[in-house]
Amino acid sequence: MGKFIISGRKVPRTGGVILVNAANTDEVDAIIREDPFHVAGVADYDVTEFVTTMAATKFSGLKNCT
C-alpha cells in the first residue's frame, strides 16, 4: 500500500513537503534511503513526527492512520 498521502513543492521553490503515513521514524528513514534524490546525494531531509488530533470532516479518516 502507498505511504505518501500528499506532496508538493514549497513556495518559494526551495524544496518540497511530503506527508507520509508511517508507523514510526524507522519506516520513514527506510523510505528516504530509497528516494532517488537521497541516492544521488542531492537532497537533505527534515523529518517532523506529529500526532493528528484534528482534521476537517472529509479528512477525518487520516486521524487514525497507522
Image (spheres, rainbow, N blue to C red):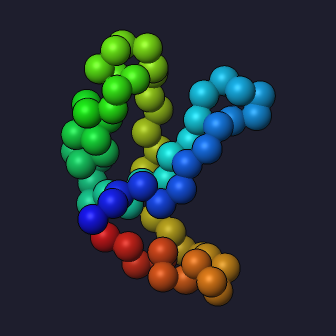
Q: Position of residue 43 (x, y in %)?
A: 45, 20
Q: Is residue 4 left or right of residue 29?
A: right
Foreground residue among 28 and 50 = 28
Quadrant housing residue 56: bottom right
Which residue extends farthest top?
41
Name the quarter where the C terminus is drawn: bottom left
Identify the residue shown where x is 63% and y is 83%. 58
The image shows residue 1, relative to residue 47, as above or below, that is: below
Q: Position of residue 12 (x, y in %)?
A: 77, 28
Quadrant housing residue 53: bottom right
Identify the residue shown where x is 24% and y is 48%. 27
Identify the residue shown where x is 40% and y is 23%. 37
One can see residue 29 in this view: no
Name the quarter where the N terminus is drawn: bottom left
The image shows residue 51, relative to residue 44, as above or below, that is: below
Which residue extends farthest bottom?
57
Q: Position of residue 13 (x, y in %)?
A: 71, 27
Q: Position of residue 48 (x, y in %)?
A: 47, 44
One can see residue 58 in this view: yes
Identify the residue shown where x is 27% and y is 60%. 23
Quadrant housing residue 6: bottom right
